[in-house]
Image: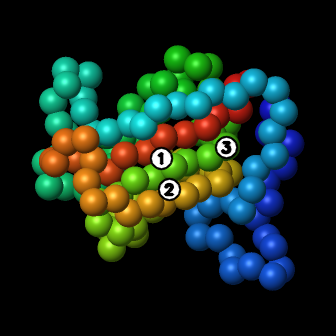
Amino acid sequence: MPIESRLNEVSANAAPNGYAHAVVTTGRTAHVSGQVALAADGQLVGPDDLRAQTGQCLRNLENILTELGATWHDVVRFGWYLVNDGDVLVVREVRDRFLGDAPKPASSLVRVPGLFRPDLLVEVDAVVALP
């Protein structure tokens, strides 16, 4: 497996909440473009509903993982872009539901003033260690 280790504890740092401090990999990786809450037909899922939009972002990402022959266990890193950083608990709850028992990847969350469409509330990209 291309993921060698995950650094979950650093004694001099605060404990991570749902992510690893670092993930060490070998082999090939895929850098997955940002996924937003657009369904296959291009329609927005969950207008004004961060929970629904986050779920659609992760469904889109899961579809890409499947095409790559990967699973949530192979995700090395998430990059989250959130219009309202006060909503991070909603994103974490939906993320944890999708990841299940998969080890938590490294992660960053950035508050942005807006995404490419004003009705989008969240976007996520990922780095995946290909099996």
Q: Hey, what amino acid is under mark 2?
A: Asp
Residue 76 is marked as 3
* Marks 1,2: beta carbons within 8 A: yes
Disc 3 element: strand
- Alpha-carbon neighbours of circle 2 within 10 Å: few (<14), some, or many (≥20)? some
Q: Work out whether 84 lies above or below 98.
A: below
Disc 2 secondary structure class: helix
Quadrant of image for the C terminus: top right
Q: Hey, what amino acid is under mark 3?
A: Val
Q: Can residue 52 be seen in this view?
A: no
Q: How crowded is mark 1: few (under 14 residues within 10 Å), some or many (20 or more)?
A: some
- Judging by the rendered image, the residue that carries numbered circle 2 is 96
Examine the image and state in which quarter residue 27 appears: top right
Q: Is residue 86 left or right of residue 13?
A: left
Q: Does 48 sit left or right of 111 as displayed?
A: left
Quadrant for the N terminus in the image:
top right
| Tag 1 residue | 98
Which badge, 3 or 2, is on the more N-terminal residue?
3
Residue at image position (24%, 29%) is: 39
Instruction: Please determine whether, in this image, residue 74 is positioned above or below residue 64.
Output: below
